[in-house]
Protein backbone atom coordinates (compact mmCIF):
# COMPACT_ATOMS: atom_id res chain seq x y z
CA UNK A 1 0.00 0.00 0.00
CA UNK A 2 1.47 3.40 -0.98
CA UNK A 3 2.14 6.23 1.44
CA UNK A 4 -0.75 8.43 0.29
CA UNK A 5 -3.32 5.74 1.00
CA UNK A 6 -1.80 4.96 4.40
CA UNK A 7 -1.89 8.63 5.35
CA UNK A 8 -5.49 9.06 4.16
CA UNK A 9 -6.58 6.00 6.14
CA UNK A 10 -4.85 7.36 9.23
CA UNK A 11 -6.55 10.77 8.84
CA UNK A 12 -9.98 9.16 8.25
CA UNK A 13 -9.63 6.96 11.35
CA UNK A 14 -8.50 9.97 13.42
CA UNK A 15 -11.52 12.03 12.37
CA UNK A 16 -13.84 9.09 13.04
CA UNK A 17 -12.63 8.60 16.61
CA UNK A 18 -12.68 12.34 17.29
CA UNK A 19 -16.28 12.59 16.08
CA UNK A 20 -17.60 9.64 18.09
CA UNK A 21 -15.79 10.84 21.22
CA UNK A 22 -17.18 14.35 20.79
CA UNK A 23 -20.66 12.94 20.15
CA UNK A 24 -20.64 11.24 23.55
CA UNK A 25 -20.02 14.60 25.26
CA UNK A 26 -22.05 16.91 23.01
CA UNK A 27 -25.33 15.00 22.86
CA UNK A 28 -27.24 17.82 24.54
CA UNK A 29 -30.66 16.29 23.82
CA UNK A 30 -29.63 12.90 25.30
CA UNK A 31 -30.81 11.06 22.18
CA UNK A 32 -27.84 8.69 22.21
CA UNK A 33 -28.59 5.53 24.23
CA UNK A 34 -26.37 5.48 27.31
CA UNK A 35 -25.26 1.90 26.70
CA UNK A 36 -23.81 2.62 23.27
CA UNK A 37 -21.42 5.23 24.65
CA UNK A 38 -19.39 2.38 26.16
CA UNK A 39 -18.70 1.14 22.63
CA UNK A 40 -17.71 4.64 21.50
CA UNK A 41 -15.01 4.80 24.17
CA UNK A 42 -13.91 1.18 23.99
CA UNK A 43 -10.37 1.91 22.72
CA UNK A 44 -9.56 4.81 25.07
CA UNK A 45 -6.53 3.49 26.89
CA UNK A 46 -6.68 4.73 30.51
CA UNK A 47 -10.47 4.32 30.92
CA UNK A 48 -10.19 0.80 29.53
CA UNK A 49 -7.41 -0.14 32.00
CA UNK A 50 -9.36 1.20 35.00
CA UNK A 51 -12.57 -0.41 33.80
CA UNK A 52 -10.79 -3.74 33.46
CA UNK A 53 -9.45 -3.50 37.00
CA UNK A 54 -12.97 -2.75 38.25
CA UNK A 55 -15.23 -5.15 36.34
CA UNK A 56 -13.10 -7.65 34.30
CA UNK A 57 -15.47 -7.74 31.31
CA UNK A 58 -14.90 -8.00 27.56
CA UNK A 59 -16.04 -4.39 27.23
CA UNK A 60 -12.95 -3.47 29.25
CA UNK A 61 -10.37 -5.13 27.00
CA UNK A 62 -9.83 -2.19 24.66
CA UNK A 63 -6.43 -1.40 26.18
CA UNK A 64 -5.28 -4.97 25.47
CA UNK A 65 -6.20 -4.60 21.81
CA UNK A 66 -4.48 -1.21 21.71
CA UNK A 67 -1.35 -2.77 23.26
CA UNK A 68 -1.34 -5.53 20.64
CA UNK A 69 -1.81 -2.99 17.83
CA UNK A 70 1.08 -0.91 19.17
CA UNK A 71 3.33 -3.99 19.31
CA UNK A 72 2.35 -4.74 15.73
CA UNK A 73 2.19 -1.33 14.07
CA UNK A 74 3.66 1.28 16.42
CA UNK A 75 1.88 4.13 18.17
CA UNK A 76 -1.36 3.92 16.20
CA UNK A 77 -3.34 4.88 19.31
CA UNK A 78 -1.52 8.22 19.50
CA UNK A 79 -1.85 8.85 15.77
CA UNK A 80 -5.49 7.86 15.26
CA UNK A 81 -7.49 7.01 18.40
CA UNK A 82 -6.42 9.62 20.94
CA UNK A 83 -8.69 12.72 20.65
CA UNK A 84 -6.02 15.03 22.07
CA UNK A 85 -3.60 13.77 19.42
CA UNK A 86 -6.08 14.61 16.66
CA UNK A 87 -6.77 18.05 18.17
CA UNK A 88 -3.02 18.73 18.10
CA UNK A 89 -2.81 17.61 14.47
CA UNK A 90 -5.69 19.91 13.52
CA UNK A 91 -3.99 22.79 15.33
CA UNK A 92 -0.62 22.22 13.65
CA UNK A 93 -2.26 21.89 10.22
CA UNK A 94 -4.12 25.17 10.71
CA UNK A 95 -0.89 26.89 11.73
CA UNK A 96 0.71 25.65 8.52
CA UNK A 97 -2.03 27.35 6.51
CA UNK A 98 -0.97 30.69 7.97
CA UNK A 99 2.74 29.99 7.95
CA UNK A 100 3.67 27.93 4.93
CA UNK A 101 7.36 28.23 5.78
CA UNK A 102 6.87 26.40 9.04
CA UNK A 103 9.20 23.42 9.36
CA UNK A 104 10.03 20.92 12.08
CA UNK A 105 13.54 19.93 13.06
CA UNK A 106 14.98 16.90 14.77
CA UNK A 107 15.49 17.34 18.50
CA UNK A 108 16.71 14.97 21.14
CA UNK A 109 14.03 13.71 23.49
CA UNK A 110 13.70 15.30 26.91
CA UNK A 111 14.37 11.94 28.47
CA UNK A 112 14.73 13.12 32.05
CA UNK A 113 11.42 15.01 31.97
CA UNK A 114 9.61 12.25 30.12
CA UNK A 115 10.62 9.51 32.52
CA UNK A 116 10.23 11.72 35.59
CA UNK A 117 6.61 12.57 34.77
CA UNK A 118 5.81 8.94 34.01
CA UNK A 119 7.45 7.64 37.19
CA UNK A 120 5.82 10.33 39.31
CA UNK A 121 2.42 9.40 37.85
CA UNK A 122 3.03 5.76 38.79
CA UNK A 123 4.11 6.77 42.29
CA UNK A 124 0.85 8.69 42.75
CA UNK A 125 -1.17 5.71 41.47
CA UNK A 126 0.58 3.22 43.74
CA UNK A 127 0.05 5.64 46.62
CA UNK A 128 -3.67 5.47 45.93
CA UNK A 129 -4.09 8.87 44.27
CA UNK A 130 -5.22 9.60 40.71
CA UNK A 131 -4.37 13.31 40.72
CA UNK A 132 -1.52 13.28 38.16
CA UNK A 133 -3.20 10.72 35.91
CA UNK A 134 -6.41 12.79 35.92
CA UNK A 135 -4.41 15.88 35.12
CA UNK A 136 -2.40 14.37 32.25
CA UNK A 137 -4.56 11.59 30.73
CA UNK A 138 -5.33 12.65 27.13
CA UNK A 139 -8.85 11.16 27.02
CA UNK A 140 -9.90 12.81 30.28
CA UNK A 141 -8.54 16.16 29.14
CA UNK A 142 -10.42 15.82 25.87
CA UNK A 143 -13.57 15.02 27.84
CA UNK A 144 -13.19 18.14 29.97
CA UNK A 145 -12.64 20.28 26.87
CA UNK A 146 -15.82 18.92 25.27
CA UNK A 147 -17.87 19.04 28.49
CA UNK A 148 -16.77 22.35 29.99
CA UNK A 149 -15.88 24.42 26.92
CA UNK A 150 -17.74 23.16 23.87
CA UNK A 151 -20.92 21.70 25.40
CA UNK A 152 -22.06 25.07 26.86
CA UNK A 153 -21.47 26.70 23.46
CA UNK A 154 -23.57 24.02 21.74
CA UNK A 155 -26.37 24.59 24.26
CA UNK A 156 -26.16 28.36 23.73
CA UNK A 157 -26.30 27.90 19.96
CA UNK A 158 -29.24 25.52 20.30
CA UNK A 159 -31.15 28.00 22.48
CA UNK A 160 -30.43 30.91 20.14
CA UNK A 161 -31.67 28.89 17.16
CA UNK A 162 -34.74 27.78 19.11
CA UNK A 163 -35.53 31.39 20.04
CA UNK A 164 -35.10 32.53 16.43
CA UNK A 165 -37.29 29.79 14.97
CA UNK A 166 -40.04 30.51 17.48
CA UNK A 167 -40.42 33.96 15.92
CA UNK A 168 -41.50 32.16 12.74
CA UNK A 169 -43.75 29.70 14.62
CA UNK A 170 -41.30 26.86 13.98
CA UNK A 171 -40.85 24.55 16.95
CA UNK A 172 -38.48 21.88 15.64
CA UNK A 173 -35.88 22.76 18.29
CA UNK A 174 -36.62 23.31 21.95
CA UNK A 175 -34.50 25.31 24.42
CA UNK A 176 -32.30 23.55 26.97
CA UNK A 177 -31.68 24.74 30.50
CA UNK A 178 -27.90 25.17 30.81
CA UNK A 179 -28.06 24.68 34.60
CA UNK A 180 -25.07 25.63 36.70
CA UNK A 181 -21.80 26.56 35.02
CA UNK A 182 -18.50 27.32 36.74
CA UNK A 183 -16.21 29.67 34.86
CA UNK A 184 -13.46 28.99 37.40
CA UNK A 185 -13.47 25.24 36.79
CA UNK A 186 -13.72 25.79 33.02
CA UNK A 187 -10.39 27.57 33.36
CA UNK A 188 -8.55 24.22 33.76
CA UNK A 189 -9.56 22.66 30.42
CA UNK A 190 -9.20 26.08 28.78
CA UNK A 191 -5.59 26.42 29.94
CA UNK A 192 -4.83 22.83 28.89
CA UNK A 193 -6.30 23.51 25.44
CA UNK A 194 -4.26 26.70 25.10
CA UNK A 195 -1.09 24.85 26.11
CA UNK A 196 -1.46 21.94 23.67
CA UNK A 197 -2.52 24.27 20.85
CA UNK A 198 0.54 26.42 21.48
CA UNK A 199 2.87 23.43 21.74
CA UNK A 200 1.44 21.81 18.61
CA UNK A 201 1.84 25.11 16.77
CA UNK A 202 5.47 25.40 17.80
CA UNK A 203 6.66 21.82 18.26
CA UNK A 204 4.06 19.37 16.89
CA UNK A 205 3.58 16.39 19.19
CA UNK A 206 5.86 17.65 21.98
CA UNK A 207 3.18 17.10 24.65
CA UNK A 208 2.65 13.48 23.55
CA UNK A 209 6.36 12.73 23.65
CA UNK A 210 7.33 14.62 26.79
CA UNK A 211 4.43 14.94 29.24
CA UNK A 212 1.70 12.42 28.38
CA UNK A 213 2.14 9.23 30.46
CA UNK A 214 0.16 7.18 27.93
CA UNK A 215 2.45 8.40 25.15
CA UNK A 216 5.52 7.45 27.18
CA UNK A 217 4.24 3.93 27.88
CA UNK A 218 3.19 3.29 24.29
CA UNK A 219 6.50 4.77 23.14
CA UNK A 220 8.33 2.02 25.07
CA UNK A 221 6.19 -0.63 23.40
CA UNK A 222 6.57 0.82 19.90
CA UNK A 223 10.32 0.39 20.16
CA UNK A 224 9.65 -3.30 19.57
CA UNK A 225 6.77 -3.03 17.08
CA UNK A 226 6.59 -5.61 14.31
CA UNK A 227 6.07 -2.98 11.59
CA UNK A 228 8.24 0.13 11.56
CA UNK A 229 9.15 3.01 9.30
CA UNK A 230 12.55 2.40 7.72
CA UNK A 231 14.93 4.68 5.85
CA UNK A 232 17.04 3.04 3.16
CA UNK A 233 20.38 4.55 4.11
CA UNK A 234 22.04 3.47 0.87
CA UNK A 235 19.44 5.14 -1.38
CA UNK A 236 18.66 8.19 0.79
CA UNK A 237 19.98 11.43 -0.74
CA UNK A 238 19.93 13.28 2.58
CA UNK A 239 17.60 16.06 1.41
CA UNK A 240 16.04 16.38 4.87
CA UNK A 241 12.46 16.84 3.64
CA UNK A 242 11.24 14.04 5.91
CA UNK A 243 12.67 15.77 8.98
CA UNK A 244 10.92 19.02 8.12
CA UNK A 245 7.44 17.40 8.14
CA UNK A 246 7.95 15.11 11.14
CA UNK A 247 5.63 16.53 13.82
CA UNK A 248 7.23 14.23 16.41
CA UNK A 249 10.67 15.70 15.65
CA UNK A 250 12.08 12.18 15.74
CA UNK A 251 13.76 11.86 12.31
CA UNK A 252 17.45 12.74 12.13
CA UNK A 253 18.23 13.02 8.43
CA UNK A 254 21.95 13.35 9.15
CA UNK A 255 22.20 9.91 10.73
CA UNK A 256 19.12 8.65 8.83
CA UNK A 257 17.58 7.24 11.99
CA UNK A 258 14.08 7.38 13.44
CA UNK A 259 13.36 7.45 17.17
CA UNK A 260 10.53 4.90 17.32
CA UNK A 261 9.62 5.77 20.92
CA UNK A 262 8.46 9.18 19.67
CA UNK A 263 7.21 8.27 16.18
CA UNK A 264 3.39 8.37 16.02
CA UNK A 265 3.20 6.66 12.61
CA UNK A 266 1.57 9.60 10.82
CA UNK A 267 3.18 8.65 7.46
CA UNK A 268 3.97 12.29 6.65
CA UNK A 269 7.60 11.39 5.96
CA UNK A 270 6.66 8.65 3.52
CA UNK A 271 4.26 10.98 1.74
CA UNK A 272 6.84 13.70 1.03
CA UNK A 273 10.00 11.67 0.41
CA UNK A 274 11.05 12.51 -3.19
CA UNK A 275 13.27 9.44 -3.47
CA UNK A 276 10.66 7.10 -1.94
CA UNK A 277 13.30 5.54 0.30
CA UNK A 278 11.12 5.52 3.44
CA UNK A 279 8.98 2.43 3.77
CA UNK A 280 6.69 0.87 6.33
CA UNK A 281 7.91 -2.69 6.63
CA UNK A 282 8.31 -5.70 8.85
CA UNK A 283 10.96 -5.46 11.48
CA UNK A 284 12.47 -8.93 11.15
CA UNK A 285 15.90 -8.32 12.67
CA UNK A 286 15.46 -7.22 16.25
CA UNK A 287 19.20 -6.70 16.60
CA UNK A 288 18.92 -3.67 14.32
CA UNK A 289 16.78 -1.84 16.88
CA UNK A 290 19.79 -0.58 18.81
CA UNK A 291 18.84 -2.78 21.72
CA UNK A 292 22.43 -2.63 22.88
CA UNK A 293 21.92 1.04 23.66
CA UNK A 294 19.46 0.05 26.36
CA UNK A 295 20.92 -0.80 29.74
CA UNK A 296 19.62 -3.40 32.14
CA UNK A 297 17.95 -0.82 34.37
CA UNK A 298 15.79 0.38 31.49
CA UNK A 299 14.81 -3.19 30.62
CA UNK A 300 13.77 -3.73 34.21
CA UNK A 301 11.82 -0.47 34.22
CA UNK A 302 9.92 -1.40 31.07
CA UNK A 303 9.10 -4.89 32.32
CA UNK A 304 7.75 -3.60 35.62
CA UNK A 305 5.66 -1.03 33.80
CA UNK A 306 4.14 -3.65 31.53
CA UNK A 307 3.38 -5.92 34.49
CA UNK A 308 1.50 -3.10 36.19
CA UNK A 309 -0.61 -2.05 33.22
CA UNK A 310 -1.29 -5.42 31.63
CA UNK A 311 -1.00 -7.93 34.46
CA UNK A 312 -3.43 -6.16 36.78
CA UNK A 313 -5.51 -6.92 34.26
CA UNK A 314 -36.11 13.54 35.04
CA UNK A 315 -37.07 16.96 34.75
CA UNK A 316 -35.74 19.14 37.54
CA UNK A 317 -38.03 20.15 40.40
CA UNK A 318 -38.86 23.81 40.76
CA UNK A 319 -37.76 25.50 43.92
CA UNK A 320 -40.50 26.04 46.48
CA UNK A 321 -42.03 29.48 46.16
CA UNK A 322 -41.35 30.34 49.78
CA UNK A 323 -39.16 33.36 50.33
CA UNK A 324 -37.55 33.48 53.78
CA UNK A 325 -37.79 36.74 55.66
CA UNK A 326 -34.79 35.94 57.82
CA UNK A 327 -31.40 34.50 56.96
CA UNK A 328 -30.44 31.17 58.51
CA UNK A 329 -27.69 31.37 61.09
CA UNK A 330 -26.30 27.87 61.67
CA UNK A 331 -23.49 27.06 59.16
CA UNK A 332 -23.64 23.76 57.28
CA UNK A 333 -20.27 22.01 57.31
CA UNK A 334 -20.35 18.80 55.33
CA UNK A 335 -17.66 16.37 56.41
CA UNK A 336 -18.06 14.12 53.35
CA UNK A 337 -19.36 14.90 49.88
CA UNK A 338 -21.59 12.35 48.18
CA UNK A 339 -20.28 10.27 45.31
CA UNK A 340 -22.72 9.12 42.59
CA UNK A 341 -24.86 5.98 43.04
CA UNK A 342 -22.95 2.95 41.78
CA UNK A 343 -19.55 4.26 42.88
CA UNK A 344 -19.65 1.98 45.97
CA UNK A 345 -17.45 4.16 48.16
CA UNK A 346 -15.41 7.33 48.11
CA UNK A 347 -12.20 5.28 47.98
CA UNK A 348 -13.34 3.30 44.93
CA UNK A 349 -14.58 6.45 43.24
CA UNK A 350 -11.44 8.48 43.89
CA UNK A 351 -9.15 5.64 42.74
CA UNK A 352 -11.04 5.01 39.49
CA UNK A 353 -12.39 8.36 38.30
CA UNK A 354 -10.23 10.26 35.78
CA UNK A 355 -12.52 13.31 35.79
CA UNK A 356 -13.42 13.04 32.10
CA UNK A 357 -16.83 14.64 32.87
CA UNK A 358 -18.82 12.31 30.64
CA UNK A 359 -21.19 11.70 33.57
CA UNK A 360 -21.56 15.48 33.94
CA UNK A 361 -22.71 15.84 30.34
CA UNK A 362 -25.25 12.99 30.41
CA UNK A 363 -26.76 13.89 33.80
CA UNK A 364 -30.25 15.25 32.98
CA UNK A 365 -30.56 17.31 36.16
CA UNK A 366 -26.90 18.45 36.16
CA UNK A 367 -26.56 17.55 39.84
CA UNK A 368 -23.14 16.17 38.89
CA UNK A 369 -20.74 19.10 38.75
CA UNK A 370 -16.93 19.35 38.57
CA UNK A 371 -15.46 19.71 42.05
CA UNK A 372 -13.16 22.45 43.17
CA UNK A 373 -11.95 21.50 46.64
CA UNK A 374 -14.89 19.31 47.66
CA UNK A 375 -12.68 16.20 47.42
CA UNK A 376 -9.54 18.06 48.46
CA UNK A 377 -6.88 19.56 46.21
CA UNK A 378 -5.80 16.20 44.78
CA UNK A 379 -9.41 15.44 43.82
CA UNK A 380 -9.89 18.65 41.90
CA UNK A 381 -12.28 18.46 38.89
CA UNK A 382 -13.75 15.11 39.95
CA UNK A 383 -17.56 15.24 39.61
CA UNK A 384 -19.52 15.48 42.84
CA UNK A 385 -23.19 15.68 43.79
CA UNK A 386 -23.96 19.40 43.98
CA UNK A 387 -27.38 19.54 45.62
CA UNK A 388 -27.43 23.32 45.42
CA UNK A 389 -27.57 22.99 41.64
CA UNK A 390 -30.15 20.21 41.55
CA UNK A 391 -30.90 16.72 42.85
CA UNK A 392 -30.33 13.12 41.72
CA UNK A 393 -33.36 11.94 39.77
CA UNK A 394 -34.78 8.92 41.58
CA UNK A 395 -35.40 6.95 38.36
CA UNK A 396 -32.27 8.00 36.44
CA UNK A 397 -29.31 5.67 35.76
CA UNK A 398 -27.61 7.68 33.00
CA UNK A 399 -24.23 8.19 34.70
CA UNK A 400 -24.13 4.54 35.82
CA UNK A 401 -24.36 3.36 32.21
CA UNK A 402 -21.74 5.59 30.58
CA UNK A 403 -18.78 5.75 32.98
CA UNK A 404 -15.80 4.53 30.88
CA UNK A 405 -13.61 3.59 33.86
CA UNK A 406 -16.43 2.05 35.95
CA UNK A 407 -15.71 4.42 38.79
CA UNK A 408 -19.51 4.44 38.68
CA UNK A 409 -20.64 0.83 38.28
CA UNK A 410 -23.86 -0.04 36.41
CA UNK A 411 -26.94 -0.89 38.45
CA UNK A 412 -30.48 -1.72 37.48
CA UNK A 413 -32.99 1.01 38.15
CA UNK A 414 -34.59 -0.79 41.10
CA UNK A 415 -31.16 -1.44 42.64
CA UNK A 416 -30.14 2.18 42.20
CA UNK A 417 -33.28 3.35 44.00
CA UNK A 418 -32.15 1.54 47.16
CA UNK A 419 -28.52 2.75 47.21
CA UNK A 420 -27.90 5.19 50.03
CA UNK A 421 -25.14 7.59 49.01
CA UNK A 422 -25.72 9.79 52.05
CA UNK A 423 -28.16 10.74 54.79
CA UNK A 424 -30.26 13.84 55.20
CA UNK A 425 -29.54 15.89 58.30
CA UNK A 426 -32.13 18.34 59.63
CA UNK A 427 -31.01 21.59 61.27
CA UNK A 428 -34.07 22.85 63.19
CA UNK A 429 -32.46 26.21 64.02
CA UNK A 430 -32.39 27.07 60.27
CA UNK A 431 -35.91 25.88 59.43
CA UNK A 432 -38.58 28.46 58.58
CA UNK A 433 -41.04 26.61 60.81
CA UNK A 434 -38.77 27.36 63.78
CA UNK A 435 -37.40 30.80 62.87
CA UNK A 436 -40.46 32.41 61.29
CA UNK A 437 -43.32 30.26 62.55
CA UNK A 438 -44.38 29.57 58.96
CA UNK A 439 -45.60 26.31 57.41
CA UNK A 440 -43.24 24.90 54.78
CA UNK A 441 -42.72 21.18 54.24
CA UNK A 442 -40.83 21.58 50.93
CA UNK A 443 -38.32 18.89 51.91
CA UNK A 444 -41.03 16.36 52.71
CA UNK A 445 -42.98 17.09 49.53
CA UNK A 446 -39.99 16.46 47.31
CA UNK A 447 -38.58 13.39 49.08
CA UNK A 448 -39.08 10.41 46.70
CA UNK A 449 -38.63 7.78 49.44
CA UNK A 450 -40.73 9.56 52.08
CA UNK A 451 -37.79 9.60 54.46
CA UNK A 452 -38.83 13.09 55.58
CA UNK A 453 -42.10 13.28 57.53
CA UNK A 454 -43.89 16.37 58.76
CA UNK A 455 -44.72 15.83 62.43
CA UNK A 456 -46.74 17.93 64.84
CA UNK A 457 -44.94 20.90 66.31
CA UNK A 458 -45.99 23.86 68.39
CA UNK A 459 -48.64 26.42 67.48
CA UNK A 460 -50.39 24.00 65.15
CA UNK A 461 -47.44 23.76 62.79
CA UNK A 462 -45.62 20.70 61.48
CA UNK A 463 -41.85 20.33 61.31
CA UNK A 464 -39.62 17.89 59.34
CA UNK A 465 -38.40 14.65 60.87
CA UNK A 466 -35.85 12.47 59.03
CA UNK A 467 -35.82 8.66 59.05
CA UNK A 468 -32.25 7.70 58.09
CA UNK A 469 -33.13 4.13 57.18
CA UNK A 470 -35.38 5.28 54.31
CA UNK A 471 -33.15 8.08 53.01
CA UNK A 472 -31.07 7.48 49.85
CA UNK A 473 -29.30 10.85 49.90
CA UNK A 474 -30.68 12.02 46.54
CA UNK A 475 -30.56 15.65 47.67
CA UNK A 476 -34.13 16.54 46.63
CA UNK A 477 -34.81 17.85 50.14
CA UNK A 478 -31.65 19.97 50.20
CA UNK A 479 -32.34 21.39 46.75
CA UNK A 480 -35.95 22.23 47.63
CA UNK A 481 -35.20 23.85 51.00
CA UNK A 482 -35.68 27.63 50.58
CA UNK A 483 -33.57 28.84 53.52
CA UNK A 484 -30.54 31.03 52.82
CA UNK A 485 -27.58 31.19 53.13
CA UNK A 486 -27.57 27.88 55.04
CA UNK A 487 -29.95 25.03 54.34
CA UNK A 488 -32.22 23.69 57.05
CA UNK A 489 -31.73 20.18 55.66
CA UNK A 490 -28.69 18.84 53.85
CA UNK A 491 -27.13 15.55 52.78
CA UNK A 492 -24.02 14.24 54.51
CA UNK A 493 -22.25 11.74 52.24
CA UNK A 494 -21.54 8.12 53.13
CA UNK A 495 -17.89 7.07 52.81
CA UNK A 496 -19.21 3.61 51.88
CA UNK A 497 -22.58 3.34 50.19
CA UNK A 498 -25.29 1.49 52.08
CA UNK A 499 -28.69 0.03 51.26
CA UNK A 500 -31.77 1.94 52.37
CA UNK A 501 -34.97 0.31 53.51
CA UNK A 502 -38.08 0.64 51.41
CA UNK A 503 -40.94 2.34 53.15
CA UNK A 504 -44.30 0.61 52.99
CA UNK A 505 -47.00 2.75 51.50
CA UNK A 506 -49.85 3.50 53.82
CA UNK A 507 -53.21 2.49 52.38
CA UNK A 508 -55.95 5.08 52.65
CA UNK A 509 -59.21 3.69 53.89
CA UNK A 510 -62.07 5.36 52.06
CA UNK A 511 -65.62 4.53 52.99
CA UNK A 512 -67.87 4.18 49.95
CA UNK A 513 -71.64 4.16 50.06
CA UNK A 514 -72.39 1.30 47.69
CA UNK A 515 -76.06 2.23 47.69
CA UNK A 516 -75.31 5.25 45.57
CA UNK A 517 -75.44 4.57 41.88
CA UNK A 518 -72.47 6.78 41.13
CA UNK A 519 -70.30 6.92 44.28
CA UNK A 520 -67.57 8.81 42.46
Image: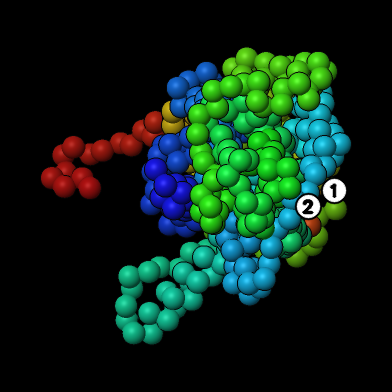
Residue at the extreme left of the image, as rendered = 517
Of all residues, the one furthest to the bottom in this rendering is 167
Q: Is residue 18 left or right of residue 211?
A: left
* 238 over 470 or under it: above or below: below
Q: Which residue is nearer to you in this view: 98 or 395?
A: 98
Q: Position of residue 36 (x, y in %)?
A: 40, 39
Q: Is residue 350 above or below residue 476?
A: above
| Residue 216, position as x, y percentages in the image | 71, 35
List the residue tagged with mark 1.
330
The answer to which quarter of the image holds residue 193 is bottom right
Decide which of 256, 223 is in the foreground and name it: 256
The disc, 2 or 1, on the residue closer to the chain's N-terminal end is 1
x and y percentages locating residue 461 in the rendered image: 65, 48
> Which residue sits at x=82%, y=37%?
111
- x then y, percent, for residue 479: 63, 50
Quadrant of the frame with the N terminus:
top left
Q: Are marks 2 and 1 in contact (CB under 8 Å)?
A: yes
- Camera-side residue: 218 or 357? 218
Q: In the picture, residue 145 is in which quadrant?
A: bottom right
Q: Residue at x 44, y 53 (%)?
A: 4
Q: Which mark is residue 486?
A: 2
Whether residue 283 is visible here, answered yes or no, is yes
Residue drawn 22% across the image and 47% down it: 520
Q: Say which mark, if any, is on residue 277.
A: none
Q: Nearer the viewer, residue 80 or 374?
A: 80
Amino acid sequence: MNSTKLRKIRVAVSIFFLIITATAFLDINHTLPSGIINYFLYFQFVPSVLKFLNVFTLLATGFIIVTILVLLYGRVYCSSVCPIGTIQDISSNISKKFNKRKKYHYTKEYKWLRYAVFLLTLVFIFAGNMFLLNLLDPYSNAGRIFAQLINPLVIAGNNFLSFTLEKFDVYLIYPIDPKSYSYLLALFPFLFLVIIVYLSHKRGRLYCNTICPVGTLLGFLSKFSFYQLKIDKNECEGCGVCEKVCKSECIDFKTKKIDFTRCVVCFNCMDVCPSEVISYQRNWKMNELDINEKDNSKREFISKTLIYFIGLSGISLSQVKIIPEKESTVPVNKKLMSSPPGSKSLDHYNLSCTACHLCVTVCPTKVLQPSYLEFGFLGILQPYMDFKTNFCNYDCVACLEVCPTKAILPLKQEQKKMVQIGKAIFVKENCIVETEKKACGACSEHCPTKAVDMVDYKEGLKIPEVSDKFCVGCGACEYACPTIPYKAIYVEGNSVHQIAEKRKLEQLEIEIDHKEEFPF
